[in-house]
Amino acid sequence: MKLDRMIGILSILLQQEKVTAPWLAEKFEVSKRTINRDIEALCMAGIPLRTEPGQNGGVSIMEGYKIDRTLLSKSDLQAILAGLRSLDSVSGTNRYACLMEKLSAGSSSLLAGDGHIFIDLSSWYKDSLSPKIELLHDAILSCRKVSFSYFAPKGESERTVEPYDLLFQWASWYLWSWCETRQDFRLFKLGRMTKLTVQGSFEKRAAPLPDLSARRVFPNIYQIKARIQPAYKWRLIEEYGPESFVEQPDQTLLFSCGFADKSSVISWIASFGDGAELLEPWELRQEVRAFAEKIFKKYEKPQH
């Protein structure tokens, strides 16, 4: 795109004293005539460029107008590149990393050793997730409504929304949008959406930022205590940190934490098999027992 190319040319000129039009043409894979038009456009935009003919000539920014090239340090550029590469992991392209390479062109030393942080935002469902993100992102930019089928614990529903933001939180992607059904702003998990279609345009309304704090989304309604076998210490450390449990004299782990709902407590305890025992609260302990009895009855009779 012309804008990306012009930004790239400006970035190069901020980092180098002088470059030639043929070098820029080769760098951006366009003709010298195109580069000359870009330089003219930059001058018309108020960027004081100077062109010098001859063997030692080239294009440069007039003295007194240069931005301090230390504005972005090596670590700054590396952090930006890592972030752009993470966006490529869900876009299905490498356009963001290519943009960064253009912006940093001529200063390869600034990006030396930048490949030590890899962030993949795509999850296990990249093939189905990337098209959703692209469609929703385009709908946000063009102010177009989106309809989809949504699957939640309370059941399936059809929704039409005004999309505002894509969010990556708690290892999942969400859409922040105005829901016509609820007449309010809602978060929708992309993994629960199917049959996405773009609808008519809408006028943007004042959109508050979503409250994504853990206390707001996952309130600690049920404070539990559980005895966990030492073989699962790795899991407690990975999921909740070493401060979540106290090692007992018999080497079992006394775990304490808050959960948002009953089903989360029961399914979490059950996922340990016989490696965990819920101690408190008493009423949930009884529900775990009832859950286990239902499972036992289901497998008690031989399959015909």
Image (tube, rainbow, N blue to C red):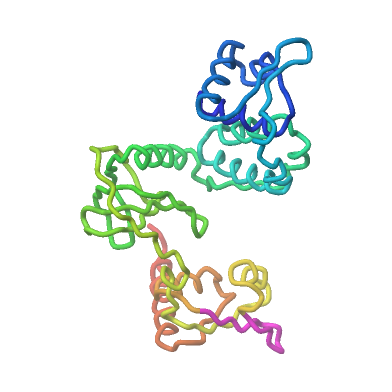
Residue at screen point 78% across, 36% down? 109
State the image coordinates of residue 175 (x, y, percent, origin top left): 38, 51
Quick check: 36 left or right of 111?
left
Q: Residue 268: within the magenta?
A: no
Of the pair 48 and 290, the residue shown nearer to us: 48
Question: Residue lying furthest front in this view?
Answer: 64
Of the pair 84 and 281, the residue shown nearer to us: 84
Say above or below: 97 vs 24.
Answer: below
Of the pair 153 and 79, the residue shown nearer to us: 79
State the image coordinates of residue 292 (x, y, percent, origin top left): 44, 75
Say above or below: 266 vs 227.
Answer: above
State the image coordinates of residue 37 (x, y, percent, origin top left): 54, 16
Q: Which range is magenta?
A: 245-257
Which of the 4 image quadrants contains residue 254? Answer: bottom right
For the C terminus, the image quarter is bottom left
Residue at screen point 60% across, 28% down? 48
Overall secondary structure of the magenta section? strand
Of the pair 182 and 257, the residue shown nearer to us: 182
Say above or below: 167 vs 262.
Answer: above
Which of the 4 image quadrants contains residue 298? Answer: bottom left
Residue at screen point 36% across, 57% down? 187
Q: Residue 255: within the magenta?
A: yes
State the image coordinates of residue 253 (x, y, percent, origin top left): 64, 81
Quick check: 162 left or right of 234?
left
Q: How many marks?
A: 0
